[in-house]
Image: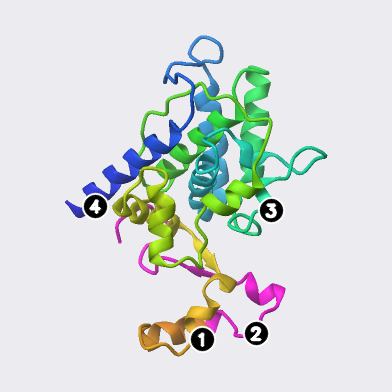
Amino acid sequence: MATTKIITSFVVILVLLGTICDAQLTSTFYDSTCPNALSTIRTAIRTAVSKERRMAASLIRLHFHDCFVKGCDASILLDDSSTIESEKSARPNINSVRGFEIIDKAKSEVEKVCPGIVSCADIVAIAARDASFAVGGPSWTVKLGRRDSTTASKSLANTDLPLFTDDLKTLISHFTKKNLTPRDMVTLSGAHTIGQAQCFTFRGRIYNNASDIDAGFASTRQRGCPSSSTTANDQKLAALDLVTPNSFDNN
């Protein structure tokens, strides 16, 4: 029952996130203009996840971080230019959010079958759904018809997106601003456990000798995350879920 509730909550949250925009969305948006769009995107995502299971969590997070900044408009994909300060370099995203090349690949494949039709914003939303299903998680109907943004907001990315260093009160505040509850926050954060965390994000936690962390757990993590900060050490990975690290489940 708990697993069913968590998965149901996750689907509801992703559906809500995916509709944060002004457009009238419909699941049949491309039925006549690009009938093979969904199957083409699904193939690209399945291929990527089969090569690296961690990519599933990354694609879900990419969608989440896109939607939290002015809606689900693919603004997170835009690079720096003379008129754009990319959201990729915002503190919650830099050296953290990934999967851009997978979206590029899916877009490239879709362009081959129906050029100039499917938006990148829709591809990001579809990719999150397909990534979830590819690792044993839920699927859902994605409403489509989003327009791609031509601008980005690094400043809003810095203020609206949660940081791994935020305390509980701050995290809840970020989600409340998007009309999401603390339960929603926990459920969406849990979707990240299909993947792995980089050492620099938890080093301070396992080396601070705090009484509120299990000593055995800290010791285990220290073996794979050296105390000294170097590029190589900072990028060392640890599974967020020790039981079934490569599956979307409630373990």
Q: Amino acid at mark 1?
A: Tyr
The amino acid on which the numbered mark 4 sits, given as a three-letter code, is Thr
| 127 in relation to 137, above or below | above
Residue to which mark 2 is pinned: 228
Quarter where residue 226 is shown: bottom right
Residue at 51% from the left image edge and 74% from the top image edge: 202
The residue depicted at 66 percent of the width and 37 percent of the height is 104
Left or right position of 68 against 189? right
Going by the numbered disc 3, the residue's amino acid type is Ser
Residue for badge 4: 3
Task: Report if residue 170 is visible in the image.
Answer: yes
| Residue at 62% from the left image edge and 17% from the top image edge | 117
Q: Secondary structure at mark 4?
A: helix
Mark 2 or mark 3, earlier in chain: 3
The front one of 52 and 160 is 160
Q: CA distance from mark 1 to mark 2?
A: 11 Å
Q: Which residues are magenta?
A: 223-251
Nearest to the observer: residue 104 or residue 112: 104
The mark that comes first in sequence, 1 or 3, is 3
According to the picture, the residue beneath numbered tag 3 turns out to be 89
* Residue pointed to by mark 1: 207
Instruction: Say if mark 1 contacts mark 3, CB within 8 Å.
Output: no
Mark 4 or mark 2, earlier in chain: 4
Question: N-terminal of the two: label 1 or label 2?
Answer: 1
